[in-house]
Image (cartoon, helix red, strand yellow):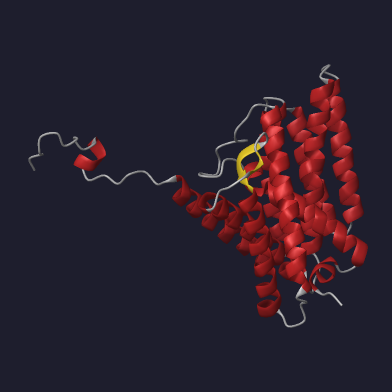
Protein backbone atom coordinates (compact mmCIF):
# COMPACT_ATOMS: atom_id res chain seq x y z
CA UNK A 1 0.00 0.00 0.00
CA UNK A 2 1.36 3.41 -0.94
CA UNK A 3 2.30 5.68 1.97
CA UNK A 4 1.47 9.35 2.15
CA UNK A 5 4.39 11.74 1.91
CA UNK A 6 5.85 12.36 5.35
CA UNK A 7 4.28 9.25 6.88
CA UNK A 8 6.89 7.23 8.82
CA UNK A 9 7.85 3.92 7.33
CA UNK A 10 6.63 0.87 9.21
CA UNK A 11 9.14 -1.26 11.04
CA UNK A 12 10.21 -4.60 9.63
CA UNK A 13 7.95 -6.38 12.09
CA UNK A 14 4.93 -4.27 11.16
CA UNK A 15 5.59 -4.70 7.43
CA UNK A 16 5.65 -8.47 7.79
CA UNK A 17 2.72 -8.59 10.17
CA UNK A 18 4.88 -9.85 13.01
CA UNK A 19 3.53 -9.24 16.51
CA UNK A 20 5.44 -6.92 18.78
CA UNK A 21 7.28 -8.48 21.70
CA UNK A 22 5.28 -8.70 24.93
CA UNK A 23 5.41 -5.78 27.30
CA UNK A 24 7.03 -5.99 30.72
CA UNK A 25 3.61 -6.16 32.38
CA UNK A 26 2.44 -9.05 30.21
CA UNK A 27 5.66 -10.95 30.84
CA UNK A 28 5.19 -10.43 34.58
CA UNK A 29 1.65 -11.78 34.35
CA UNK A 30 2.57 -14.84 32.27
CA UNK A 31 5.48 -15.71 34.55
CA UNK A 32 3.42 -15.19 37.69
CA UNK A 33 0.55 -17.38 36.44
CA UNK A 34 2.95 -20.20 35.58
CA UNK A 35 4.75 -20.02 38.94
CA UNK A 36 1.47 -19.83 40.86
CA UNK A 37 0.16 -22.93 39.09
CA UNK A 38 3.32 -24.93 39.88
CA UNK A 39 3.42 -23.70 43.49
CA UNK A 40 -0.23 -24.53 44.18
CA UNK A 41 -0.03 -27.94 42.54
CA UNK A 42 3.01 -29.05 44.54
CA UNK A 43 1.69 -27.46 47.74
CA UNK A 44 -1.60 -29.35 47.57
CA UNK A 45 -0.07 -32.64 46.42
CA UNK A 46 1.83 -33.53 49.60
CA UNK A 47 4.26 -32.33 52.24
CA UNK A 48 7.07 -34.09 50.37
CA UNK A 49 6.31 -32.42 47.04
CA UNK A 50 6.11 -29.05 48.77
CA UNK A 51 9.47 -29.68 50.46
CA UNK A 52 10.92 -30.53 47.03
CA UNK A 53 9.53 -27.28 45.63
CA UNK A 54 11.07 -25.24 48.43
CA UNK A 55 14.41 -27.05 48.13
CA UNK A 56 14.55 -26.33 44.39
CA UNK A 57 13.78 -22.66 44.92
CA UNK A 58 16.33 -22.36 47.71
CA UNK A 59 18.94 -24.04 45.48
CA UNK A 60 18.42 -21.43 42.78
CA UNK A 61 18.53 -18.71 45.42
CA UNK A 62 21.86 -20.06 46.69
CA UNK A 63 23.25 -19.77 43.17
CA UNK A 64 21.90 -16.22 42.84
CA UNK A 65 23.24 -15.23 46.26
CA UNK A 66 26.70 -16.47 45.30
CA UNK A 67 26.60 -14.42 42.10
CA UNK A 68 25.48 -11.40 44.10
CA UNK A 69 27.98 -11.40 46.97
CA UNK A 70 30.90 -13.44 45.55
CA UNK A 71 30.49 -13.06 41.79
CA UNK A 72 30.54 -16.87 41.74
CA UNK A 73 27.39 -18.92 41.48
CA UNK A 74 28.80 -22.44 41.45
CA UNK A 75 31.52 -22.89 44.06
CA UNK A 76 32.21 -24.78 47.27
CA UNK A 77 30.07 -22.43 49.38
CA UNK A 78 27.16 -23.04 47.01
CA UNK A 79 27.55 -26.81 47.42
CA UNK A 80 27.61 -26.55 51.20
CA UNK A 81 24.49 -24.38 51.23
CA UNK A 82 22.64 -26.84 48.98
CA UNK A 83 23.63 -29.74 51.23
CA UNK A 84 22.52 -27.89 54.36
CA UNK A 85 19.20 -26.96 52.73
CA UNK A 86 18.53 -30.54 51.63
CA UNK A 87 19.28 -31.90 55.11
CA UNK A 88 17.11 -29.22 56.70
CA UNK A 89 14.20 -29.96 54.37
CA UNK A 90 14.44 -33.70 55.03
CA UNK A 91 14.66 -33.19 58.79
CA UNK A 92 11.60 -30.95 58.75
CA UNK A 93 9.58 -33.45 56.73
CA UNK A 94 10.62 -36.13 59.21
CA UNK A 95 9.22 -34.05 62.06
CA UNK A 96 12.37 -32.52 63.54
CA UNK A 97 12.38 -28.78 62.78
CA UNK A 98 14.96 -28.23 65.54
CA UNK A 99 17.32 -30.58 63.67
CA UNK A 100 16.61 -28.59 60.52
CA UNK A 101 17.55 -25.32 62.19
CA UNK A 102 20.78 -26.89 63.42
CA UNK A 103 21.55 -27.99 59.84
CA UNK A 104 21.07 -24.42 58.60
CA UNK A 105 23.29 -23.02 61.35
CA UNK A 106 25.97 -25.64 60.66
CA UNK A 107 25.82 -24.81 56.96
CA UNK A 108 26.21 -21.11 57.63
CA UNK A 109 29.22 -21.71 59.91
CA UNK A 110 30.83 -23.99 57.32
CA UNK A 111 30.34 -21.43 54.55
CA UNK A 112 31.83 -18.72 56.74
CA UNK A 113 35.00 -20.68 57.41
CA UNK A 114 35.33 -21.76 53.79
CA UNK A 115 35.28 -18.15 52.62
CA UNK A 116 37.41 -16.94 55.56
CA UNK A 117 40.12 -19.40 54.53
CA UNK A 118 40.43 -17.40 51.33
CA UNK A 119 41.12 -14.23 53.35
CA UNK A 120 37.77 -12.73 52.36
CA UNK A 121 36.26 -11.99 55.78
CA UNK A 122 33.60 -9.39 54.75
CA UNK A 123 32.53 -11.64 51.90
CA UNK A 124 32.50 -14.59 54.30
CA UNK A 125 29.91 -12.85 56.49
CA UNK A 126 27.71 -12.13 53.49
CA UNK A 127 28.03 -15.69 52.20
CA UNK A 128 27.06 -17.14 55.59
CA UNK A 129 24.15 -14.70 55.84
CA UNK A 130 22.76 -16.15 52.62
CA UNK A 131 22.39 -19.56 54.28
CA UNK A 132 20.32 -18.05 57.09
CA UNK A 133 18.42 -15.77 54.71
CA UNK A 134 17.08 -18.68 52.68
CA UNK A 135 17.32 -21.55 55.16
CA UNK A 136 15.23 -20.33 58.08
CA UNK A 137 12.19 -19.34 55.95
CA UNK A 138 12.45 -22.65 54.09
CA UNK A 139 12.27 -24.59 57.36
CA UNK A 140 9.34 -22.43 58.52
CA UNK A 141 7.38 -23.06 55.31
CA UNK A 142 7.90 -26.84 55.30
CA UNK A 143 7.19 -27.04 59.04
CA UNK A 144 3.90 -25.15 58.69
CA UNK A 145 2.88 -27.28 55.68
CA UNK A 146 3.52 -30.36 57.79
CA UNK A 147 0.56 -29.62 60.07
CA UNK A 148 -1.79 -32.49 59.07
CA UNK A 149 -4.98 -30.57 59.79
CA UNK A 150 -4.29 -27.02 58.62
CA UNK A 151 -0.90 -27.09 56.90
CA UNK A 152 -1.86 -26.66 53.27
CA UNK A 153 -4.48 -24.04 54.14
CA UNK A 154 -1.94 -22.05 56.17
CA UNK A 155 0.53 -22.10 53.26
CA UNK A 156 -2.24 -21.08 50.87
CA UNK A 157 -3.05 -18.17 53.19
CA UNK A 158 0.60 -17.08 53.21
CA UNK A 159 0.82 -17.33 49.43
CA UNK A 160 -2.37 -15.33 48.89
CA UNK A 161 -1.23 -12.66 51.34
CA UNK A 162 2.19 -12.19 49.74
CA UNK A 163 0.99 -12.49 46.15
CA UNK A 164 -1.77 -9.96 46.79
CA UNK A 165 0.72 -7.62 48.45
CA UNK A 166 3.19 -7.81 45.58
CA UNK A 167 0.58 -7.34 42.85
CA UNK A 168 -1.36 -4.58 44.59
CA UNK A 169 1.79 -2.67 45.58
CA UNK A 170 2.98 -2.80 41.96
CA UNK A 171 -0.38 -1.65 40.55
CA UNK A 172 -1.05 1.06 43.12
CA UNK A 173 2.48 2.35 42.73
CA UNK A 174 2.11 2.58 38.95
CA UNK A 175 -1.39 4.03 38.88
CA UNK A 176 -1.24 6.45 41.81
CA UNK A 177 2.47 7.12 42.22
CA UNK A 178 3.21 9.86 44.70
CA UNK A 179 5.97 10.18 47.29
CA UNK A 180 8.74 7.62 47.15
CA UNK A 181 9.00 5.11 49.98
CA UNK A 182 12.78 4.73 50.05
CA UNK A 183 14.27 6.46 46.99
CA UNK A 184 17.88 5.68 47.89
CA UNK A 185 17.14 1.98 48.20
CA UNK A 186 14.40 1.37 45.63
CA UNK A 187 13.48 4.42 43.53
CA UNK A 188 10.28 2.89 42.11
CA UNK A 189 8.58 2.00 45.39
CA UNK A 190 6.01 4.47 46.70
CA UNK A 191 3.97 5.02 49.82
CA UNK A 192 0.84 4.44 47.76
CA UNK A 193 2.19 1.02 46.83
CA UNK A 194 2.96 0.19 50.46
CA UNK A 195 -0.49 1.23 51.69
CA UNK A 196 -2.32 -0.26 48.73
CA UNK A 197 -0.45 -3.55 49.06
CA UNK A 198 -1.10 -3.86 52.79
CA UNK A 199 -4.75 -2.85 52.49
CA UNK A 200 -5.37 -5.28 49.65
CA UNK A 201 -3.69 -8.07 51.62
CA UNK A 202 -5.98 -7.33 54.57
CA UNK A 203 -9.02 -7.60 52.30
CA UNK A 204 -7.69 -10.86 50.86
CA UNK A 205 -7.18 -12.21 54.39
CA UNK A 206 -10.77 -11.35 55.30
CA UNK A 207 -12.11 -13.03 52.16
CA UNK A 208 -9.96 -16.08 52.88
CA UNK A 209 -11.33 -16.31 56.42
CA UNK A 210 -14.92 -16.12 55.17
CA UNK A 211 -14.62 -18.42 52.18
CA UNK A 212 -12.08 -21.07 53.19
CA UNK A 213 -13.53 -22.24 56.50
CA UNK A 214 -16.09 -20.86 58.91
CA UNK A 215 -13.77 -21.66 61.82
CA UNK A 216 -11.20 -19.15 60.64
CA UNK A 217 -11.21 -15.84 62.43
CA UNK A 218 -11.59 -12.41 60.78
CA UNK A 219 -8.42 -11.54 62.69
CA UNK A 220 -6.70 -13.11 59.69
CA UNK A 221 -7.30 -9.78 57.95
CA UNK A 222 -5.19 -7.96 60.54
CA UNK A 223 -2.51 -10.65 60.43
CA UNK A 224 -2.43 -10.35 56.64
CA UNK A 225 -1.79 -6.61 56.93
CA UNK A 226 1.11 -7.24 59.32
CA UNK A 227 2.58 -9.95 57.09
CA UNK A 228 2.15 -7.68 54.07
CA UNK A 229 4.17 -4.93 55.74
CA UNK A 230 6.85 -7.45 56.72
CA UNK A 231 6.91 -8.79 53.15
CA UNK A 232 7.45 -5.30 51.76
CA UNK A 233 10.20 -4.75 54.33
CA UNK A 234 11.82 -7.89 52.95
CA UNK A 235 11.50 -6.52 49.45
CA UNK A 236 13.26 -3.32 50.51
CA UNK A 237 15.94 -5.29 52.33
CA UNK A 238 16.78 -7.30 49.24
CA UNK A 239 16.86 -4.10 47.17
CA UNK A 240 19.31 -2.59 49.65
CA UNK A 241 21.59 -5.63 49.40
CA UNK A 242 21.53 -5.50 45.60
CA UNK A 243 22.39 -1.81 45.73
CA UNK A 244 25.38 -2.54 48.01
CA UNK A 245 26.75 -4.97 45.43
CA UNK A 246 25.73 -2.90 42.41
CA UNK A 247 23.32 -5.43 40.88
CA UNK A 248 19.86 -4.67 39.50
CA UNK A 249 18.48 -8.23 39.35
CA UNK A 250 19.90 -11.34 40.97
CA UNK A 251 19.37 -13.17 37.65
CA UNK A 252 17.11 -13.19 34.62
CA UNK A 253 15.53 -16.59 35.15
CA UNK A 254 11.96 -15.30 35.53
CA UNK A 255 10.86 -13.07 32.62
CA UNK A 256 9.53 -9.74 33.84
CA UNK A 257 10.62 -10.38 37.43
CA UNK A 258 14.36 -10.99 37.41
CA UNK A 259 15.59 -13.79 39.64
CA UNK A 260 14.02 -16.10 42.19
CA UNK A 261 15.36 -13.89 44.98
CA UNK A 262 13.72 -10.89 43.32
CA UNK A 263 10.43 -12.75 43.14
CA UNK A 264 10.14 -14.30 46.62
CA UNK A 265 12.10 -11.87 48.80
CA UNK A 266 8.88 -10.77 50.50
CA UNK A 267 7.75 -14.35 51.04
CA UNK A 268 11.00 -15.16 52.84
CA UNK A 269 10.41 -12.47 55.46
CA UNK A 270 6.69 -13.23 55.80
CA UNK A 271 7.34 -16.98 56.14
CA UNK A 272 9.96 -16.44 58.84
CA UNK A 273 7.62 -14.13 60.76
CA UNK A 274 4.76 -16.63 60.41
CA UNK A 275 7.03 -19.40 61.66
CA UNK A 276 8.05 -17.43 64.74
CA UNK A 277 4.42 -16.57 65.46
CA UNK A 278 3.27 -20.17 65.07
CA UNK A 279 6.10 -21.41 67.31
CA UNK A 280 5.13 -18.94 70.04
CA UNK A 281 1.43 -19.87 69.90
CA UNK A 282 1.27 -23.62 69.30
CA UNK A 283 4.46 -25.43 68.23
CA UNK A 284 2.61 -28.75 67.89
CA UNK A 285 0.11 -27.34 65.37
CA UNK A 286 1.72 -24.49 63.41
CA UNK A 287 -0.94 -24.31 60.71
CA UNK A 288 -3.73 -24.11 63.24
CA UNK A 289 -1.79 -21.52 65.24
CA UNK A 290 -1.82 -19.19 62.23
CA UNK A 291 -5.41 -19.70 61.12
CA UNK A 292 -7.56 -20.38 64.18
CA UNK A 293 -7.68 -17.52 66.65
CA UNK A 294 -9.79 -17.32 69.83
Q: Quadrant of the C terminus?
A: bottom right
The front one of 169 and 211 is: 169
Task: Tell me the quarter of the picture where residue 18 sits.
Answer: top left
State the residue at coordinates (57%, 40%).
Answer: 258
Q: Is residue 47 visible?
A: no
Image-based side of 64 in relation to 111, left or right: left
**Residue 270 to residue 220: above or below:** above
Q: Position of residue 8 (x, y in %)?
A: 19, 35
* Left or right, 93 with reference to 188: right
Q: In terms of depth relative to the viewer, which is nearer, 249 or 86?
A: 249
- Quadrant for residue 211, please give it: bottom right
**Residue 266: percent from the left, percent from the top?**
70, 50
Image position of 180 (left or right of 237): left
Q: Residue sitting at 42 percent across and 46 percent down?
A: 23
What's the residue at 59%, 36% (across, down)?
A: 251
Nearer to us in this view, 62 or 217: 217
Specify the quadrant that holds the N terminus: top left
Res 214 visible: yes
Give the residue at x 23% y 36%: 12
Q: Hey, which residue is sitting farthest front in the picture?
A: 179
Amino acid sequence: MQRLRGEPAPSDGEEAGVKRPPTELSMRVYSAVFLIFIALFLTLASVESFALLITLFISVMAWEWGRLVRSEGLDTAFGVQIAATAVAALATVQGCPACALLAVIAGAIAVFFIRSAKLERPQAWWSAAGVYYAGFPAVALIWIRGDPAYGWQAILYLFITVWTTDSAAYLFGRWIGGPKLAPRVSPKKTWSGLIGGAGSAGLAGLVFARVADGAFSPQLALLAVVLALIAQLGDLGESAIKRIFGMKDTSGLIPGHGGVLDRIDGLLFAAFAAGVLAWSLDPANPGRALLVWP
